[in-house]
Image (tube, grey):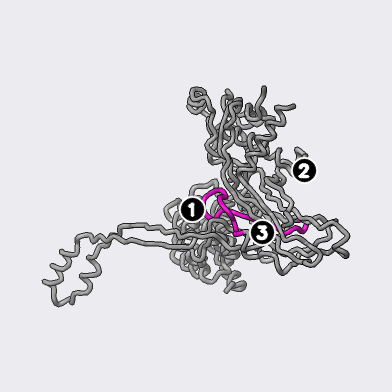
Amino acid sequence: MAMKHGNSDNRRRAFADVVTIDAWHDAFDGVRSRTDLHADVVFGTARVGAERSSPVRFRLSIKQAEIVVLIPESEPVSVDVKSVSREAPRPSGQLTEISERETQNHAKGAISASVAPSALQASASVEAGAQATLSTRKKVEISAKIDFMIVTSSKTEDGHYRWVVRPGTGVFLEGRPWDAEKNPRLKIIDERKDPTKSIPPTVRVEVHCRREDLVIEDLEIKDEGVWQTAKSRFGFNNRMAAAISYIQDRLAEEGLEVKNIEDIFGHVTLASVTAQSV
Amino acid sequence: MSHWLDKTITLLQADTFDLRELARIAGADPKTFYRGIRLADLDVSGQNVEDMEFADRRFEDKKNKDAQSRLISYTDNKSISVIEAARELHRVGRQEERVAILLDLILRNPDDALLLINLYSKDRAKYANRVLKQIETEVRSNRQGDTLFQEEKGRRLNAIQLARIINRPFSRGMPNNRAALLYYMAKHLARYPDINKYLREKITDTRSIFIVPLRSEIIGFLDHGDENVIL
């Protein structure tokens, strides 16, 4: 049983490394009834399997995720619809691509056509000279602004506000999708009738992804000899696919919103925090 | 003492590389187990993966579903889905008639031409297959306005361009094939004025013994087509 908990902890730790989240808002002190909800989310890569008992190691990252603000129906708090962050600022950089190509022109037709028919002599010599192939090198420089992460706001089926985050370049999420301090997610409104006599409302912020959004990379067996043999056998890609799918299943199981094996492709909860009142 | 990753060693060292068998070893349902894996990265020779989901196949499935639900004009009074149209086309007995109907469908539904060609995919006869490939090449060339998010529609070809494309492979074939093509083009395409004119010129020029017995019927189609002209 202790081992089972240990395994579960390892998986939880992996999630903690791929995404960390902090959420906070100014305290509802009876005077203030509207406040900004901030959520600081950082995506990264987890190295899994470092512990001695693990036979394999791999890197775990997330292909795409959604960040959801959860307000239970029972909580006396509402959202100021106008305040919801619709256009998240995008951390961006400059992508420059230089491609070079060689173009060849056979100039014969063009040049001989420009010579008057009467100047036959001249025409012949120009034509001969122009027989040679002309080569020019063309350099094309394309510059475009790129987004490291693309954020799209929408609502979940249950009506909670969410922001779907996808990588602008690359295959997994890395870094912060927004500046949490400067760009709060939304404004929450304290709906208590008598704030002095009841407990302040609480909201939660969660990060979800799908099972197939769990990216497993550089999976290898720690025992070098066993690893080399495994790699050299025919059908290795299929065995690798099965091993990756198995890891995705186990990780998804750990973060399943509903503990129901039928729902293995439902949302995996990577992180969940209650917004702190500060 | 067991570790949650122990099973990965069993899988990586398994004697089999059969995807179903590996899923069973993992204690999972083979149908959904490889959802996050690209089929293109696997070795599936000799394996039946028909009902299994893969990351890259889901996109294809979606495209097929879209196509299945998209209705196109099949005849003047009948609209059917592109997949049904492709299926109907495969049922037609002669390659010359299949080609003529395909051309009619493309002219009726120019924006779905590429989808139709992709779904029809392959004909069982040589000349019809060449026609298919040629049309696809022409439709795909000089595309304009394609973006990452816009569906690929391809170039709109006019009636006469298409007529020439389908005539080309047959012109190198047997005279009876040519005669049959002329006959079925007249039957299905006479109401397109450019094609009607093109066919009339063809039938006037020819002395083919295969066309002579069909001539009056072909002219009948062309005259009737004149009454139902599509501009």
Query: What whole-number distance in Å separates the C-alpha atoms at marks 1 and 2?
Result: 50 Å
- Range shown magenta: A157-179
Q: Is residue B135 left or right of residue B104?
A: left
Query: What whole-number distance in Å separates the C-alpha atoms at marks 3 and 1?
Result: 23 Å
Residue placed furthest toward the left: A121
Residue drawn at (77%, 66%), measured in percent from left and top?
A: A32
Is A168 part of what is drawn in magenta?
A: yes
Q: Is residue B36 above or below residue A118?
A: above
Q: Chain of mark 1?
A: B
Location of residue A47 in the rendering, given as x and y in whole percent from the top left corner: 56, 38
Residue assigned mark 3: B70
Q: Amino acid at mark 3?
A: Arg
Residue assigned mark 2: A258
Q: Chain of mark 2?
A: A
Q: Tag 1 or tag 3, which sits nearer the N-term? A: 3
Q: Amino acid at mark 2?
A: Val
Residue B74 seen: no
SS for callout 1: helix
Q: Is residue A272 left or right of residue B34?
A: right
Residue assigned mark 1: B133
